[in-house]
């Protein structure tokens, strides 16, 4: 299992380095800067008027993805602190148990919704932009990490006692969350 951990660590480091390289601005020759800036503004302005629905729908789905990710991600800290919460709030034991059962029962479905929303979000915004920019690459990396985590999650659902698989699942999702944060704040 040490090999798998090393592989994940090296993969994450590689993704962070590639992400950093992709965030570097595209080079522009100084003589062409003013012409490039003017053409870029008008191209973006015309596209924005034509495809505003694609952009708005894509952004809405993106925020839906973030909210659904939060719903799926809250399960782990809630599981770890549920006993403590029941001690602090003895009158709320039934509510805490109900929330735990709901999240446990629908965790996989929420994860599937996250993947679907994320994929549709990326597709709509790529169709709107028509360019393969650094935000798109960050989104693709995040989507890929979530898809890999889903594979390990399905395996984990069949056998919940696999601690190494759980660690890989959580590690990939943490990487995806970092990429999503960079994706959001970089846009």
Image (tube, rainbow, N blue to C red):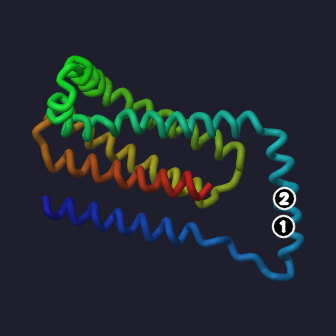
Q: Which residue is mark 1?
A: 37
Residue 171 place in picture, x, y as percent: 29, 53
Task: Pick whichever, 56 or 147, lies toward us.
Answer: 56
Q: Is residue 76 above or below residue 10?
A: above
Label 2's element? helix
Label 2 CA crowd tier, 10 Å (few <14, some 14–19, many 20+): few
Place of residue 63 in the rendered image (x, y in percent of width and height, measured from the top left):
55, 38
Q: Nearer the viewer, residue 96 or 137?
A: 96
Q: Quadrant of the C terminus?
A: bottom right
* Residue that badge 2 annotates: 41
Instruction: Give percent across and percent down for residue 8.
Output: 28, 61
Residue nearest the observer in this picture, 118 or 105:
105
Give the class, few, some or many, for how many residues have Cα within 10 Å of label 1's Cα (few <14, many ≥20).
Answer: few
Q: Quadrant of residue 37?
A: bottom right
Position of residue 141 in the picture relative to residue 106 (left or right): right
Relative to residue 111, is residue 39 depicted above or below?
A: below
Instruction: Give coordinates of residue 25: x percent, y percent.
Output: 65, 71
9, above or below 144, in the image? below
Q: Is residue 158 left or right of residue 35?
A: left
Q: Which residue is most to the left? A: 161
Residue at (36% x, 27% y) in the render: 109
Q: Label 2 vs label 1: CA separation? A: 6 Å
Q: Residue at x 52, y 34 (%)?
A: 64
Q: Quadrant of residue 158?
A: top left
Q: Confirm or deny contact between disc 2 and disc 1 (CB under 8 A).
A: yes
x 54%, y 54%: residue: 183
- Which part of the image, by quadrant, shows the N terminus? bottom left
Q: Residue at the location (60% across, 72% down)?
A: 24
SS class of the residue under badge 1?
helix
């Amino acid at each position: 299992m040490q090999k798998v951990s090393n592989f994940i660590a090296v993969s994450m480091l590689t993704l962070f380095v590639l992400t950093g390289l992709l965030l570097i601005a595209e080079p522009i020759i100084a003589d062409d800067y003013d012409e490039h800036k003017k053409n870029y503004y008008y191209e973006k302005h015309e596209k924005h008027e034509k495809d505003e629905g694609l952009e708005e729908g894509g952004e809405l789905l993106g925020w839906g993805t973030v909210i659904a990710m939060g719903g799926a991600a809250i399960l782990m800290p809630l599981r770890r602190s549920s006993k403590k919460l029941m001690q602090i709030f003895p009158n709320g034991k039934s509510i805490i148990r109900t929330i735990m059962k709901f999240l446990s029962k629908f965790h996989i479905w929420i994860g599937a919704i996250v993947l679907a929303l994320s994929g549709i979000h990326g597709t709509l915004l790529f169709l709107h932009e028509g360019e393969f920019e650094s935000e798109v690459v960050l989104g693709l990396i995040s989507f890929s990490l979530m898809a890999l985590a889903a594979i390990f999650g399905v395996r984990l659902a069949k056998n919940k006692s696999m601690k190494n698989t759980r660690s890989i699942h959580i590690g990939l999702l943490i990487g995806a969350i970092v990429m999503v944060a960079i994706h959001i704040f970089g846009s």
